[in-house]
Image (cartoon, helix red, strand yellow):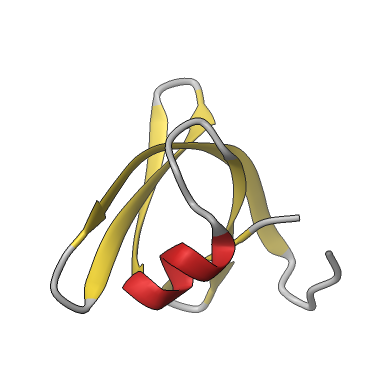
């Protein structure tokens, strides 16, 4: 994965809750710290996000995006 954002934090998905259009993804980055992001249900499916999978929190300005290898 190549990305211009410098704030990429690797962790493990601990929860995925899909809503009507958007879902909430929680990523444990260690030491009891959880990063939470609201992304589309379509993105959850495209990234194959599920509990236990490794993913990256990609932080740019005030937004948190999620990325996978």
Q: Which residue is drawn at 79% across and 78% down?
A: 4
* Quarter of the picture holding the C terminus: bottom right
As drawn, which residue projects farthest toward the right? 2
Q: Position of residue 3 (x, y in %)?
A: 79, 74
Instruction: Name the foreground residue: 28 vs 51.
Output: 51
What residue is at 83 percent from the left and 64 percent from the top? 1
Q: Quadrant of residue 2?
A: bottom right
In the picture shown, does residue 37 fall above or below 4? above
Residue 50 location in percent, x, y? 45, 44
Query: Which residue is outermost to the left?
Result: 20
The residue drawn where x is 50% and y is 78% is: 61
- The answer to whether 59 appears left or right of 63 in the picture is right
Count of marks overlaid on the render = 0
Looking at the image, can residue 40 be seen?
no
Going 54% across and 69% down the picture, which residue do you hit?
A: 46
In the rendered image, which quarter is residue 60 located in? bottom right
């Amino acid at each position: 994965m190549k990305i211009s954002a410098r704030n990429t934090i690797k962790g493990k998905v601990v929860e995925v809750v899909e809503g009507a259009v958007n879902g909430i993804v929680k990523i444990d980055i260690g030491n009891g710290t959880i990063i939470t992001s609201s992304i589309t249900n379509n993105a959850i499916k495209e990234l194959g996000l599920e509990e236990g999978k490794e993913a990256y929190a990609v932080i740019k300005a005030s937004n948190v995006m999620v990325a996978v290898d």
